Amino acid sequence: MNDDLNRWGPGADREEPVVEEFFAAHRRAVVEHDADEQTWEAIRVRAGRTGRGGRGGLWFLGGVVAATAAATTAFLLAGQGLGGDVAEAPPASTPTDQVVATSTAAPSTTDDTTAGTTDGASDTTGTGAAEEPVAEPSTGTVLPMLDPDATIAVAGHPSGDESPLRVSVGQYDCEAGEREWACPALLVSEDSGQTWTRTVDMFTSGFYGAVSARGHIWMWGPDLTDTDRDDIPVTPSRLVRSDDGGQTWVEVATRGTTLGVETFRSTLVVVTEGCAGGGPEECAEVVVTDLTADDATSGRRTATLEGADPLLCTTFPAPGDLPRAEIYATYDAVYVEAVGGVYRLADGASVASVVERPRDCADVLPAPESKDGLVAWEPGTAAVWTSADGGASWQEVTDLPGGVSAAASNDGTRMVIDTDQGVFVGTGGAWVRVTSVDEAEVSEIWPLGGESVRVSGRYRYVAPDLVQHDGRDLAASWLTEDGGQTWTEEPQLAIPGAP
Amino acid sequence: MRQETPNRRGRTGVPEDMTTIMGDLTAVRERRRPAARAAAFDVAESEVREVYLAHFGALAGWAAHLVGDPDLGHDMATEAFVRLLRSWESVELARPWLYTTVGNLVKDHWRKRGRESAAYRRFQGGVDPEVGQTSRVDPATVLTVRDAVESLPERLRMAVLLHYFGDLTVAEVARQLGKADGTIKSDLHEARRRLAVILEGVR
């Protein structure tokens, strides 16, 4: 161990030998990997060392696609504005700023909505979860319900503010959970979040995301047909929708593996993996369509997300290393974070542009009450920026009270930030500490529009025994509706069957 | 030339003379002139490869232990080396830089996802059911590093991760985090006190 431990003071570590023993035990448990040639070659290639003096970050693109990608940030596949004309399609090989693909990605063709509910899938849960399909089908297909004995460990933030129907994705205790895998379950409220019902066992059906809006629920999941992980059901990527509170489900066709889904008013945004001429890790596609659409292979607008370095800001989402997309829809634009970049699809536009972040891999959130306002920050540092032009230029926020872990703003000026010194509200140079949330395990700050901001932990429900040490609560949540002057603590979700 | 901080790694299998190697590499970088930049492309790759051979295995294992997934740990270490190769000219000390980079990736992973597994373990009482309640257990099986680190205030976490588990010196941690040595010592002192209470409680 480091010799300089004892420089802190006489007998410093001897006072707490348990700490040294603890970390020593963990250091002994580290299993070294091989430094093999294959990995080194992968590092070289990813760092742009394939061709001497070549373009770093675009090594994966080839032919016309590469040439075009160097000149533009996105490819138009098919444009269809509301009531407008379909965009004229130049030849795919034309290196212009807008290129229409001559072929489209194959839509998801799974026609068996119950796929993933087979014996093999249900056997892997360790909870016997797939045995109780209690909902009676009306239209669509019934999905397996969550085992009544399954323990919901945590539940995420609900969606669906515009109607009494809300959903939250819970994580239930399962064997796969011991290996950093999630076992999600759909929790539904039909009374604006007052009471909740445990419904679909998402895990056994291969669904990992869910969102609700205006009385509808969508669930989607990755392509796990090639998974070789223990205890993980082998399931295809699917997007399904329920119009009856989660009792039955209909398939929504997509352009490929669904990375993320979001809604905004009457709009449904679906992001899928890959694009015409590009592989799944190189680019993605976004479809903007109507909430009630049964086919999300096309819609009002379809654009390709391409041009950022997909490997520069590699993230490692759980479960496993499944790729995903974060989507933020505002009145003025749809922002998508996927395949290494943040993309902006302006209202009415059919070409997505790369948002140039002020620093590699900085987190970015739109300011929903500003036309093109963005907030960016680099977690763990005292670095926050704002942009009033969709990321074309950035201004650094100075005089921060500490290292920032999250930031948000509705109007792009007045901010709420979480720092290692606490949560603060204000602008550069004038910060007011929010004392009521000082003890929170803040991990997220969401600008909700107007003057509303939510500061919260990652979850909205954590089983009582899971509350972290020294009283900090992973499911704590505070809401302000007056720009941060007053804050109201929000209760945890009332999950049935909670211990 | 700036004084190098001695590297006393040994536990991870890194040669003890790595300090010398790194010192030499730093010297090579500092002697570079603009006219030599074409050749620097090859030099950088060669230098980073030496660092790769010396540190990758331990770094990947370190990350894997933190995230509980060998493949993910391998990916994180790979990502750190990709960034190192891209940023080689501006990196002063490779090993602290690599561990800090992976530490940030791990923290980001913890922050964004993967809360569930640790939560399950605490929910089950923090004890491996196969080990049982009565036997004296290895501390590493009672609480994960993540449990310990995340029990601390945010401002203390990275220093603890890098110093206690990453085995970086106080000076290296201070340099990587942009803080004074005294601040890091003070932070580690506070962290140690807090951790002792928690660890004594789960014994």
Image: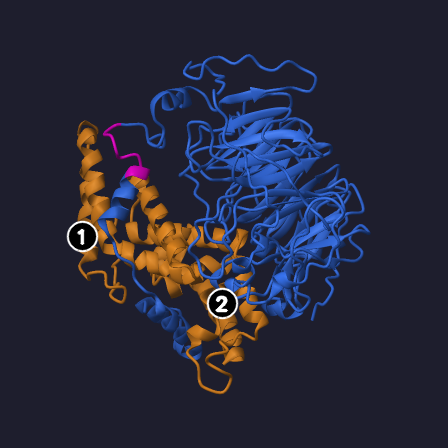
Chain colours: A blue, B orange
Q: Residues within 10 Å of mark 1 (few under 14, many from 20)?
A: some
In front here: A417 or A316?
A316
Question: Which structural element holds mark 1?
Answer: helix
Kindly identify which numbered label has been placed on residue A194.
none
Q: Is residue A304 magenta?
A: no
Question: Which structural element holds mark 2?
Answer: helix
Q: Are marks 1 and 2 in contact (CB under 8 Å)?
A: no
Name the chain under label 1: B
In front here: A148 or A54?
A148
Kindly identify which numbered label has been placed on residue B21.
1
Q: Main secondary structure of the magenta part?
A: loop
Which mark is nearer the camera, 1 or 2?
Answer: 2
Q: Could you tell me how far apart the alpha carbons at marks 1 and 2 are, in whole angstroms?
A: 34 Å
- The residue under label 2 is B148
Residue at the (37%, 50%) spot, across then down: B75
In front here: A117 or B174?
A117
Residue B105 location (% of width, % of height): 44, 50
Left or right of A413, for residue A15: left
Residue at the (71%, 53%) spot, across then down: A478
Left or right of B165, for residue A363: right
- Above or below for B69 versus A376: below
In front here: A214 or B66?
A214
The residues colored magenta run A45-53
Residue A339 location (% of width, % of height): 47, 37
Residue at the (34%, 26%) spot, across then down: A62
